[in-house]
Each structure stands twice: as C-alpha cells, then as structure tokens.
Image: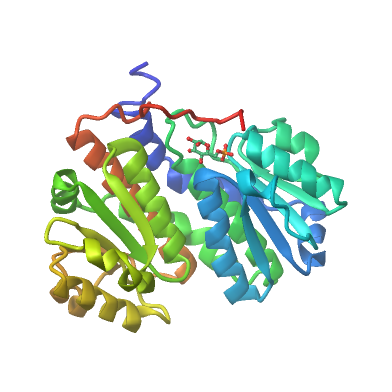
Amino acid sequence: EDTRKGGFTHYMLKEIYEQPQSFYETIRAGISERVRKMVMEADEITLVACGTSYHTALIFKYLAESLCSIPVRVEMGSEFKYFTPPLRGLVIAVSQSGETADTIAALKMAKARNCPTLAITNMQGSTVTRIADQTLLMRAGPEISVAATKSYIAQLAALMEIINVRCEGAFDDVLSHAHLAIEDVLLQEIKEAVDLCAKAEHIFFVGRGPFYPVSMEGALKMKEISYVHAEGYAAGELKHGPFALLTSETPVVAICTPCPTYGVMASNIKEMKARRAPIIAIGVFGDTELAEIVDIFIPIPKTHLLVQVLTASVVLQLLAYHTACALQRDVDKPRNLAKSVTVE
Ligand code: G6P
C-alpha cells in the first residue's frame, strides 16, 4: 500500500501532486475530429453531472458563455431525470467514473430525445461511453481517493479544450502551459490558513463568476474530508442571509483575482471584515492592496483567467487536505461516502 502511495501520506495528496500531469496529458491527447464536429455544430450545450463533476460543469458554463458566447445549461443528474427541461443542442454527461446512476439516467433521457450526446469521463469502456454518441476521455489515470482532485483538473482540461475548439484555438498557448502554473501552486505555503480552518465550525467559501463554482468545490472538499461545515456562496449573495452568521469565528475564504469583478469582490471582502469574519484571500502575487485588507493572503501566479481557475482550485484542495490531516480524519476514505454512487 505504501509503495502505491509513492511516498505520500495519502492517495489524495499523491493525486493532488499528479495534477500538472493530468491536465497536461488531457490537453495533449486533444479532441477527435468527430467530437470537434459535434462541438462546432452545437448552438446550445446542456451538461449533466453530479458532485465535483457538477462543479466543473458550472465552471464551464461561466467560461464558455463569456469566452465563446455559446448558451450553456447545467443540470444535476438527480434532478434532470424527474424534471427534464426542454432540450435543444448537444448534451454532455460529465462523470469521472462513468458509472454514476443519476448521470447515466440523465444521459439516457437525452438520447431518448434524440439529442447528440457526448461523454466526458476518465474511464474507458464505462457505462456513459457505451450510451453516448461520442466520448472525450480525460487522462487523469486511476483515482483512488474518494475525494476527486486530479479528475476534477482533467475534466476542466477537457472542458477548456472544448472552449478552445469553439474559439478556433485562441487558447492553445494558455492551455499548453497551464500545467506549469499548477506545479508552482503545489509549493504554496498555507499553514496559517489551515490552522484557522481546523479551529472553525463553519467556513464560507466565496467568489464571483467562475470562482463561484470554484468556491462551491472548495466547500465540498472541506466538508467531505474534514467534516467541517462549509458553504460555497456567490460573494454578492452573502448579504441576503449568511451575513447573519458571520462572527470572528467564521472564516471566509475569498477568491479575488484580477478579472472584471475584482473591484466589487474587494468591497465584499471589506463588508465581511466589518462583520469581524477573518478573511483568507486567494489573490495574485504582488497584490499588496488586497494583502493589506485581509487576515491571510495566499498568492497564486498572475495568469490567464482559465489558469487562475485551476490554480485557485488547487489551493482549496490543499486547504481541505491539510485541514483534514490536522483534524486526523480518514482522508482517503471519508465516512459515509463512496467513490462512485451507482444507486439513485
Ligand atoms: C461521488 C464521489 C464524488 C464525485 C461524484 C460524481 O459522490 O464521491 O467525488 O464527484 O460521485 O462522480 P462521477 O464519477 O460521476 O464524476
């Protein structure tokens, strides 16, 4: 067992460290002509997914709608089956395992309605690949830890590749170098933030735009492996309720990088500070203004928005991982959870 962990304490940490490679390999594998054609012909895209895969789908929605102006809808597999929306255009099932019952059910509904279907999965030959018209395989390799990490990054690689295809290769350069920024961020020191999270009973994760689903994923990782209650929120929504919960004991992890919402995000942070919440901010290197107004500043490299999404996510994985370790949790096998949920 120890040899298979390659010297790492847990599979999860090993898999977090494999992410530069998962991303790189998935980009390098590219997209087949048939998938490319399908993507180019779509005038609307619906994604169906569960759990972490649902979060990558939401990130895709924000990025694809803003970068290549294609309408995208995202549905949870478990809801879609019973409340199927009117469908038009390409339907993509996103599933690491390719065996999640709710995602399979949703994919079958889409097929029954004669929509072109694509499976994005890490498992060649899995059930979704047998149902969908086409498959786009992620190259994460086997993921052992229950919490998805490298498959999340590989899913983002596949989805960003779809955006790149729609934008006629505009992001070729960004995507082929992104793994280097992921490598950098693996070395980031986060001990102070971990100490704060390990003492907390509740943590909020907030962001705007694509960083909203990145925050949801950060909160999910924290919940599932550390058992600390965490919520991912759109930063602008906190004032519509959760502000009532903010005290000096509820840390807020805020993602605030240079993008159109930087200014409004910075004022949200000030509002949260005024309610005494300790702020852990993820921003870019050299942002001294932000570093000054927050309690703990975690820098990520100054890169393209697509890459910021990846690096901010990796910081949140590390935060959840080290918090879970500090609390002596069973990181690779959290209680009550399964790697793949094959029942409805
Ligand atoms: C389970 C796993 C999650 C995963 C979800 C969807 O809940 O614990 O890590 O995100 O299933 O799995 P899939 O294989 O469809 O991506």
Is residue 282 visible in the rendered structure shown here?
no
Please count the marks in the image: 0
Q: Is residue 110 above or below residue 289?
A: above
Compared across the picture, whether 37 is left or right of 274 comes to right
Q: Quadrant of the C terminus?
A: top right
Image location (x, y in percent) of residue 276: 12, 68
Compare residues 83 and 114 and report the one nearer the observer: 83
Q: Is residue 243 above or below residue 184?
A: below
Compared across the picture, whether 269 is left or right of 206 comes to left
Residue 279, image quadrant:
bottom left
Residue 313, image quadrant:
bottom left
Q: Residue at x 35, y 47 (%)?
A: 317
Q: Residue at x 32, y 45 (%)?
A: 222
Compare residues 3 and 74 and report the one nearer the observer: 74
Q: Is residue 83 above or below residue 255?
A: above
Image location (x, y in percent) of residue 233: 38, 62
Q: Residue at x 75, y 49 (%)?
A: 118
Image location (x, y in percent) of residue 324: 25, 37
Q: Most extreme residue toward the top, as rendered?
A: 1
